[in-house]
Image (spheres, grey):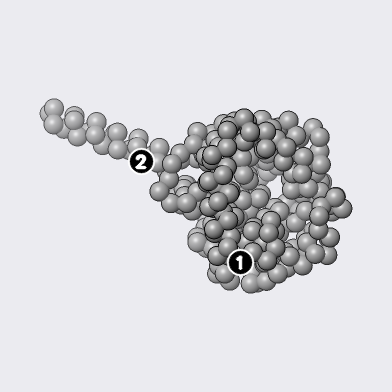
Amino acid sequence: MRKQVLQMIVLFLVMIVTATHTRAFDIEEYGLEGGPVLIFIPGLASHGELWKPWVSQYQKTHRVFVMTAPGFAASKPKETASGFLQARIDEVSVFLKNKNVKEVSVVGHSIGGLMSLMLAGQHPDLVKRVLVVDSLPYMAGLFAPGLTPEQAEVQAKFVKDQMKAMPHDAFVAQQKQGAYILSKTPEFIPTLNRWAETSDQETIANAFGDAFAMDYRRNLKGIKAQVTVMAAHDPQMPITRSAMEALYKEQYADLDNKQLMIVDDSFHFIMIDQPRVFAQALGNFIK
């Protein structure tokens, strides 16, 4: 009898550990059980609350999942054997399969957009459509035009190590300084600063390094899902509108089933700077 009880306790502990491993990220669920599935993935150092207005809208008609990656915006960091991006894709795919859902609509911003493409490419059985918000499959091509993928890998390691070695106060100050080129909406800057202050420095370095080093252009041909891509542009940016459009067309050239739209008068956070344009695009995307 004692042996049986001990076996049950061990089994219970294993189930807890397995569940904890599967839920290595924060994910909230809203809406209709059995309804069409919509999942929101925010970008670097961002919290799932970014999507709150659209979660409130679509939870009436959809089953909605909202992700916050570990180490982002006060979410508990977690070490993973694989790279940051791949670990998140593995976790999300397991989560969705455990929920027994299919034909998922995925909305991803920034590196969340890159993760959305990866999820669609690696799990075509799960993903029906993807909305990529201001993200590229080869991000290094935006930060450093002409940089080869091999050079990007070297540069990514250098930048990642630099970010990790920075004194924390200097790291947070740098993040806050960068907030003003991410959104044109002054009221949103304190939120960006709060997310930056409560994000784990090492996690941010690893995530940025992974994204900078990745070249997912070669994998786009394998994506079967319908993809809508939104790209931000503003006259204050150091790139013309036509050059931005050409960059996106070039990087997404191998993706057959796509629609590209340039959103004017917006910085990186399109859903904040141009909420009406984003809301209309999201509505069309879901339909």
Q: Secondary structure at mark 1?
A: loop
Seen in the image, is 272 located left or right of residue 14? right
- In-front residue for pair 182/7: 182
Q: Residue at x 67, y 37 (%)?
A: 174
How far across and how far down the image is residue 91, in percent? 46, 48
Q: Are marks 1 and 2 in contact (CB under 8 Å)?
A: no
Q: CA distance from mark 1 to mark 2?
A: 40 Å
Quarter occupied by residue 114: bottom right
- In-front residue for pair 197/168: 168
- In-front residue for pair 129/229: 229
The quarter of the rendered structure image containing the N terminus is: top left
- In-front residue for pair 77/177: 177
In the displayed image of the protein, which residue is found farthest to the top? 2
The quarter of the rendered structure image containing the C terminus is: bottom right
Q: Residue at x 66, y 30 (%)?
A: 194
Looking at marks 1 and 2 on the same chain, the residue that comes earlier in the sequence is marked by 2
Q: Amino acid at mark 1?
A: Thr
How far across and how far down the image is residue 4, in percent? 16, 32
| Disc ID at residue 148 | 1
Q: Secondary structure at mark 2?
A: helix
Q: Residues within 10 Å of mark 1 (few under 14, many from 20)?
A: few
| Disc ID at residue 18 | 2
Q: Amino acid at mark 2?
A: Thr
